[in-house]
Amino acid sequence: MNPKHIDEVPEFIKDDKGKDIPRRAVAPYNFVELPNKVVVAEELPSGDRYYPDRHTGKIECTLTTESLLYTRCGWNPDDFAKYSEPPTHKTKEEKERWEKEEKAKWERERREIIAHFFSSPGSSLAAIPGSSIRGMLRTLVEIVSFGKIDRVSDQQHFFFRAVAAEADDPLKEEYKKYIKPKNIKAGYLVNRQDKWLIRPAMPIDQEPFVWVKEDRLRSISGFIPMRNLPEYRPQYFINISFQDIYTKNTRRFAGEVSSNCTTYQYKGVVVTSGNMLEGGTNPRDLKRQNHCIVREPNPDAQPIPISEDAIWDYCSALTPFQKQEPPFDENKGVFKNGRCIFYCQPEPGQPVTLFGQSPNFRIPYSPQGNGKASTARDFIPDFLKDSKDKPAITDVAEAIFGFVRRNQQPEETEQSRVGRVFVSDGILKSNQEKQVQASQEKTPVKILLSSPKPTTFQHYLVQKVADKSQLKHYASQPPSDTKPGKTVIRGHKLYWHKPARIEVPSDASDTQTSLIKPIDSGIEFTFTIHFENLSQVELGALLWVLSLSSEKSQTLETGKSDEKYCFSLGMGKPLGMGAVKIDYELHLSDRTERYKNLFDGNLWHTGKQNNTKEADCVKAFENFILDQNKGISEDDHPNGRRANSLKEVPRIEMLLAMLRCDPKLDEEQTRYMTIDKKDYVNRPVLPTPLQVMGISDNRRPSFSASSSANGKAVITSKPATQNQESARQTEISKLVQKQQLKEGQITEAKVTNKKEQGKQVTYEIIATSQKLSPKEPKKYETLSIGQIVKVKIVGLREDGSIKSIKCVD
């Protein structure tokens, strides 16, 4: 069973002094939690014929905007050529002249061109791309059909810094494990044959570098002090000299610094660093007053290689601070031949894995402690994602919309399959043209949107308790194929519906904002969904989703009584934009009847059927998802009983809560937290959608750490009867009972893993699929992964499963 998020995040927890510490976060988004099992799709049809027991036809839809809506326009060839990238220049002088005289005009024109609403090619009429509608529908089908959550990137690697973290911060000890003052060294980057190394710097009184107070640097020409917030950036000043080394609070400082390299005893480089305001704009919040000085490269020291994996992780996780030019590179950050760098001294013979532009550099979240940075994908349970180690399974969403596997599949497993659903563009209704034209003639609106911040782990990861010191993060143990791990990602991210309000801070620059021309609420578009060879279950999945925002949510009983739902589309969802509803009519086509005749009177013969099967399809889908054997996990049903309909399942209740648009939540419940308000100081936890909407949480408990009313950890005991086993555990139990194993029995096993530490070998018993990991000090070197060996059963558990084995090959 997946770790479960805390069901009730308290508003406050009292600290040891009786002070109320805020614990409940707010955000314009929330999550529909992960399923505990993937519901596998029915057998897929061949694509070379129509099947009489499957459905072909179309769904004619009317989409109505319920708030401001904006979908960005595409480029025409001329605009793309001129504005997609800044022009190239043959000389440095040409580039400088363009930046001085023409860049501002070019950027303004570019912003105004892409501000327009999307329109169909060859037409000036507003339209909604069919790909956008299709993507929205696929996500919702994926959620309601308990599908995989496979399309999560593993490219963004997570780093953190906890230099001045409070004692109860969960990252404080994690940071101290790796970043210790005595282990931080300084050196210079060396590039050799596309490999990066670090040549250590010469020591200063046996120290790798010294500190210098900022007021000692004001005589250096060009130096920008940290209090000049708008202009401040990291700086390097080479060929300086310094002396008068003294100690203060265990740190070594230089008392005198000169830009003349011959004035004082030592020569080196001044390295300034970030102000650690993390986006704040108040100079009074500045805590830093010191910078660093590093001596010249040590000609007698051997360069130390840097791990290529560590470089890749670093470059894929660059922050805006680490990308700013000058002095850094947008793609490579600090990496520049000859540049000063700080690093953790590795073990002899090992490469550098931890490094940065200042002594207090960011380090990767590394659950294994090997310097390999974690990603969001690491925190998805194995059964919910495809991997190169196992054949992919097909869920309902993939069966309907198609798929392309990210990993090469065995010959008997499909690598890709075309979808059987085709969504047209949303075309503006003819009587709506004047209304849309009026909105498009308005002055473009400034909008400020930022990229997601998944490193806010108290929001994006499951938290079992609200106590700050016990929060899980990206260095916590992720799930594996045998263990649920300490935490997982929260699930599918959706945005709350709320009154649309576009506000931009007065100090926001043009580089932080975009111009848009949204269309108003009440505008109607029409689009058509064509489908082929859908089973009753597959068509039911599509209709279940489509019905939610229409009156059919009540007649088909997909939604809760008297609740109104909307979908989300386009940009600006965090600001309340993008709410839409869809009304539809189903038209089925009997393909056998269709091809019996060419004409039906003066019209084409379509084989059109009545749509009385709509309710039957929706019911078939619900029955399929709730089926006791093929359907969802018992752990996903309400606590104490099995759900009779999909809307009773707690996970679907979360979805319905997120889609509610009556009433819309107030701004305070759905705003972004800010650094200026110090909302993030205590790492408050984002509650579930059920708690936000005041809905009773009927999820089944995950029998581990839960929370009491004050958010502290409480350990609950596991029931004696385990009716909530994973699919794998259930299968193992069945195989064990069938085999009737005995102590002393010889059976075959496959070597699946080896660990050097402890000489541990993992075997998978072929007859039962059990995995055991005994220590094999004598046979460790002779065994290889994938090898089939004979093992002796040394001990059995009470349930008949194997407790211990010994290799006898």
Image (cartoon, helix red, strand yellow):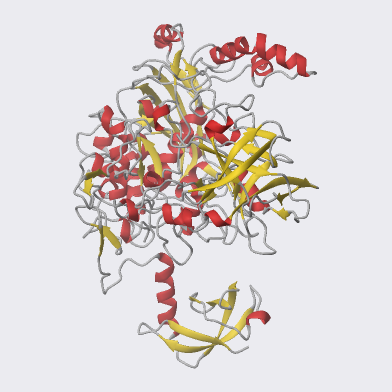
Nearest the viewer among 544 and 259 is: 259
Q: Quadrant of the N terminus?
A: bottom left
Left or right placement of residue 236 versus residue 5 in this view: right
Nearest the viewer among 741 and 585 is: 741
Residue 700 position (above or below residue 84): below
Nearest the viewer among 507 and 423 is: 507
- Residue 548 locus on image (x, y percent): 31, 35
Residue at point 54%, 78% (across, down): 766
- Residue 256 locus on image (x, y percent): 60, 37
Residue 371 in view in this figure: yes
Left or right placement of residue 746 versus residue 538 in this view: right
Q: Quadrant of residue 785?
A: bottom right
Which residue is outermost to the bottom?
744
- Residue 216 locus on image (x, y percent): 56, 33
Left or right placement of residue 199 versus residue 143 in this view: right
Q: Quadrant of residue 501?
A: top left
Residue 233 position (above or below residue 301): above
Residue 101 position (above or below residue 681): above
Q: Quadrant of the C terminus?
A: bottom right
